[in-house]
Amino acid sequence: MNAPPDVQRASRSPLRLALRKFAQHRLAIYGMIALSGLYALMILAEFAAPYDFKTTRSQRFHPPSRIHWRTPQGRWTAPYAYAAFAVVDGDFRRHYVEASPDNLAYLKKRLGGAAPDTSRAYPLRLFVRGDEYRPWFLAAPKWLLEKARLRALAEHVPDRCTLHLFGLGGGAGPGAPMFHLLGADDLGRDLFSRILYGSRVSLTIGFAAVVITFSLGLLIGGVSGYFGGRVDISLQRLVEAMMLLPGFYILLALYAALPKDLSSTGRYFAIVLILACIGWAGLARTVRGIVLSLRQNDYVLASRALGVRPLSIIVRHILPNTFSYVIVAVTLAIPGYMLGESGLSFLGLGIAEPYASWGNMLGLTRDPYYCANYPWILVPGLFILLTVVSFNLLGDGLRDAFDPKTVVGRKT
């Protein structure tokens, strides 16, 4: 005989109840889907980006390319785009005009009689050949085949690849037109490609900093709350001193002390360490309060009676009971670290050119002239906004899911 529904609901584990409550939080699900898409594009950046992040052309500040779905005769067709040419109008302003049949006469007038063929349309296709890159997702299979002594098969795995997710068909090489989904920057580099490559900095720096921050915060907060007394007082004075320091200015001071000849990888890890050093104090104070309420529980007293070492009790029995708070805190802390890196890079103190991050891509927006005339350079800021909002929605959903006071609604 089956148990009543109330008994079945009461028998569910806390994790299953949390997952069910999270599944009913629509905004959190949308945030998780958005983050999943962003991280998938980050992982496959070389393949998903139509060009390399350093590929430059003469088309400075090229606007987003227009995609056509109809022929000049009005019939529906596969998507295609025209090449675009830079012209100077009567007010001596430089702008781009696509080489469509409607603009043919204007282009010939502005470019002169020796203008190139402006009537060719380039189809927009999937899986096209383009800039060469090293496929990291093929490096692991090749390494495994070599370790398994299958060198004959390993030789068929390429070291280099030119296949990209999408691009213009019928045009390759230095003279071929470029398709700019989100426009180009001041050096003619494709903005969409640089956003995908830059996501590897902006989307991972938060996770890297959180690992260090939360390790310090959990350990110091756990030790302070468990031992109490002079240990607690000493550690809390240190925590209060760290919390009194102005975070962003300390960030600037620490970064100014770094060597100027650091590589891009060195800058990345330096920013991670700096962000981690100034972000653990608040977490340590909160964890200390949680541990104070947990150290008198029966399982902690039993471990003490059995002679278990204090550090083992903290790590194995007390800190795991703070994970419901930690999971939520992580999702809310990651966007803060991402904004910290973006702020440094925006000021020119973070990731340096030619490497991309969403922060240094916004460096041009410091000039109002560029913002007014080339508004597509603000697109990296929209990606930052989308990521921060998605993480906050996810954090809200996790907070409600792990809150025992929230009630799981009935399905209708």
Image (spheres, rainbow, N blue to C red):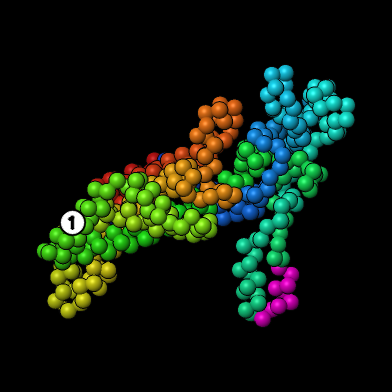
What residue is drawn where x is 86% and y is 33%? 117
* Closer to the camera in the image, 176 or 271: 271
Residue 364 coordinates in the image, percent (x, y):
54, 37
Q: Residue furthest top?
A: 90
What residue is drawn where x is 83% and y is 22%? 109
- Is disc 1 placed on a helix, strand or loop? helix
Q: Which residues are magenta?
A: 149-157
Q: Is residue 9 magenta?
A: no
The quarter of the picture where the C terminus appears is top left
Q: Residue furthest right?
A: 113
* Closer to the camera in the image, 52 or 47: 52
Amino acid residing under circle 1: Arg
Residue 211 coordinates in the image, percent (x, y):
38, 60
**Is residue 3 shown left or right of residue 344?**
left
Q: Identify the image quadrant of residue 151.
A: bottom right
Residue 129 coordinates in the image, percent (x, y):
75, 52
What residue is drawn where x is 62% and y is 38%? 186
**Is residue 188 shown left or right of residue 329?**
right
**Is residue 206 shown left or right of residue 65?**
left
Q: Identify the image quadrant of residue 86.
A: top right
Q: Residue furthest left?
A: 229
Please tell me whether residue 327 is drawn above or below residue 316 in the rendered image.
above
Residue with the mark numbered 1: 237
The quarter of the picture where the N terminus appears is bottom left
Please tell me whether residue 27 is drawn above or below residue 330 in the rendered image.
above
Residue 196 coordinates in the image, percent (x, y):
58, 48
* Closer to the camera in the image, 135 or 176: 176
Please tell me whether residue 387 is drawn above or below residue 92 in the rendered image.
below
* Closer to the camera in the image, 264 or 23: 264
Is there any visible trace of residue 266 in the rendered image?
yes
Is there any visible trace of residue 14 in the rendered image?
no
